[in-house]
Image (spheres, grey):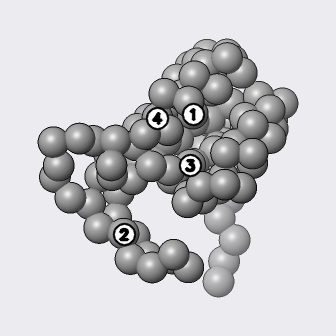
Amino acid sequence: MEQLQFDEENTGIPLTKMLKIEVVVSGEHQELVTGMMQDSGVTGYTIINNVSGYGHGGSHEARLLFNDKANLIMIMAVAPESVITNIAKGLKTLLEGQSGVMFVSEVSVARLTYFS
């Protein structure tokens, strides 16, 4: 497979490397996670409600309930490495005693002003 060359030299788009964190947790932890992100300096995040999936804990299916806190949610944010590292350290403690997962990956952003 040919390696992609999506960089400023090939596209004319200035890109900056940052980290993205994606967290899947019970909706009851939404305020805790988003508060941690805000306190760490994240300038924005995206929340996806009613997440379904399958993992070592079995199948999780989104259900329309009167209480959104009973369903799984995914919260995503992009920020500099130091900010994401701080969030990941805090989430490690939460995830040790709860169901949920965390993913951290490198991304390139084109509109740096949105993340600073």
Disc 1 designates what residue? 33
Residue 2 place in picture, x, y as percent? 66, 77
Q: CA distance from mark 4 to mark 2?
A: 17 Å
> Mark 2 or 1 closer to N-term?
1
Marks 4 and 3 sit apart, C-alpha to C-alpha, by 10 Å
Q: Is residue 2 above or below residue 14?
A: below
**Distance in Å between CA atoms under marks 3 and 2:** 15 Å
Checking the image for residue 23, the label placed there is: 3
Residue 28 lies, in percent from the top left, at: 43, 39
Visible residue check, residue 66: yes
Q: Disc 1 versus disc 4: distance between alpha carbons?
A: 5 Å
List the residue tagged with mark 4: 30
Name which residue type carries label 1.
Answer: Val
SS for callout 3: strand
Q: Secondary structure at mark 2?
A: strand
At horizontal 65% and vertical 65% (from top left) the residue drawn is 4
Give the image location of residue 49, x and y in percent: 32, 45
- Rounded to the nearest angstrom, the CA distance separating label 3 from label 1 is 9 Å
Q: Secondary structure at mark 4?
A: helix
Q: Which residue is mark 2?
A: 60
Above or below, 3 against 6 in this view is: below
Name, please, the residue furthest toward the front.
Answer: 97
Q: Are marks 1 and 4 in contact (CB under 8 Å)?
A: yes
CB within 8 Å, label 3 to label 1:
yes
In the image, taking residue 7 as reference, residue 32 lies left or right, namely left
